[in-house]
């Protein structure tokens, strides 16, 4: 069901068709452009967007994180294959939206923090184990192997998490 963004009331089938036709028209305008830049997209958004959250700044939403937007936006924005400059029409309960993926270098620091935290966790654990009885730990190769495996599991879990939850920004 598609609803009016200001009233929350359901739109009629004819109103939904009108919204879709308008979105198709804007997407066709985009596709006809020779210079498909973020600025050109922003100009189209300024001229055509009904989104009160972004229609005065070229449709830009910054620092978007998972769960911040509607599900259909999240799925598109955080798709692992997404790359800068991607454009697509996305449907949500508020209608049809032409999305332009800007990318988001602002979240690169999160990967650094997660990596540092994983390394710090491992270092703390290893120091704790060595502190218990350093001669046994260093002499016992099996004990060290266990530590390496635990660290590798933590790193693998972190890598999987990062791959599944890449943070980005999108304009819509």
Image (cartoon, rainbow, N blue to C red):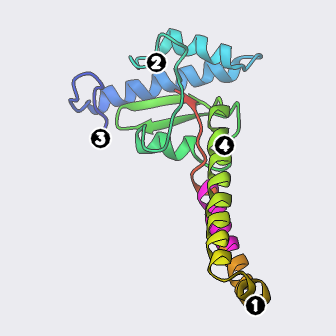
Q: Which residue is rendered at x = 57% and y = 31% of the image?
A: 170
Looking at the picture, does residue 92 appear above or below residue 142? Answer: above
- Mark 2 highlights which residue? 54
Q: Which residue is rendered at x = 28% and y = 26% of the image?
A: 4
Helix, strand or loop at label 4? It is loop
> Does the stretch in magenta take in 153?
yes
Q: Which residue is rendered at x = 63% and y = 32% of the image?
A: 106
Q: Give the mark nearer the N terminus: 3 vs 4.
A: 3
Helix, strand or loop at label 2? It is loop
Start and end of the magenta stretch? 151-162
- Mark 1 highlights which residue? 140
Q: Give the mark nearer the N terminus: 3 vs 1.
A: 3
Helix, strand or loop at label 3? It is loop
- Mark 4 highlights which residue? 82
Q: Nearer the viewer, mark 2 or mark 3?
A: 2
Disc 2 from disc 1: Cα separation? 61 Å
Q: Is residue 71 left or right of residue 45?
A: left
Q: Which of marks 3 and 1 is in front?
A: 1
| Crowd rating for badge 1 (residues with CA inside 10 Å; few <14, some 14–19, many 20+) | few
> Does the stretch in magenta take in 149?
no
Disc 2 from disc 3: Cα separation? 23 Å
Disc 3 from disc 1: Cα separation? 64 Å
Q: Give the mark nearer the N terminus: 1 vs 4.
A: 4
Question: Disc number at residue 72?
Answer: none
Judging depth in this view, the residue of 70 and 127 nearest the camera is 127
Helix, strand or loop at label 1? It is loop
Question: Disc number at residue 1?
Answer: 3
Disc 2 from disc 4: Cα separation? 21 Å
Q: In this view, does 50 lie to the left or right of 159?
A: left
Q: Are marks 2 and 4 in contact (CB under 8 Å)?
A: no
């Amino acid at each position: 069901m598609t609803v009016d963004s200001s009233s929350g009331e359901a739109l009629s089938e004819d109103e939904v068709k009108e919204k879709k036709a308008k979105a198709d028209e804007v997407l066709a305008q985009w596709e006809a452009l020779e210079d498909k830049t973020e600025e050109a997209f922003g100009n189209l958004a300024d001229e055509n967007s009904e989104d009160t959250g972004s229609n005065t700044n070229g449709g830009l939403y910054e620092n978007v994180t998972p769960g911040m937007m509607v599900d259909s936006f999240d799925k598109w924005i955080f798709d692992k294959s997404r790359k800068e400059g991607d454009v697509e029409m996305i449907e949500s309960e508020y209608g049809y939206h032409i999305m332009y993926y800007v990318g988001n270098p602002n979240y690169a620091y999160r990967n650094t923090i997660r990596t540092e935290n994983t390394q710090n966790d491992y270092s703390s654990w290893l120091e704790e184990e060595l502190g218990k009885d350093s001669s046994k730990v260093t002499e016992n190769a099996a004990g060290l192997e266990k530590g390496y495996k635990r660290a590798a599991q933590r790193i693998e879990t972190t890598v999987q998490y990062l791959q599944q939850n890449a943070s980005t920004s999108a304009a819509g």
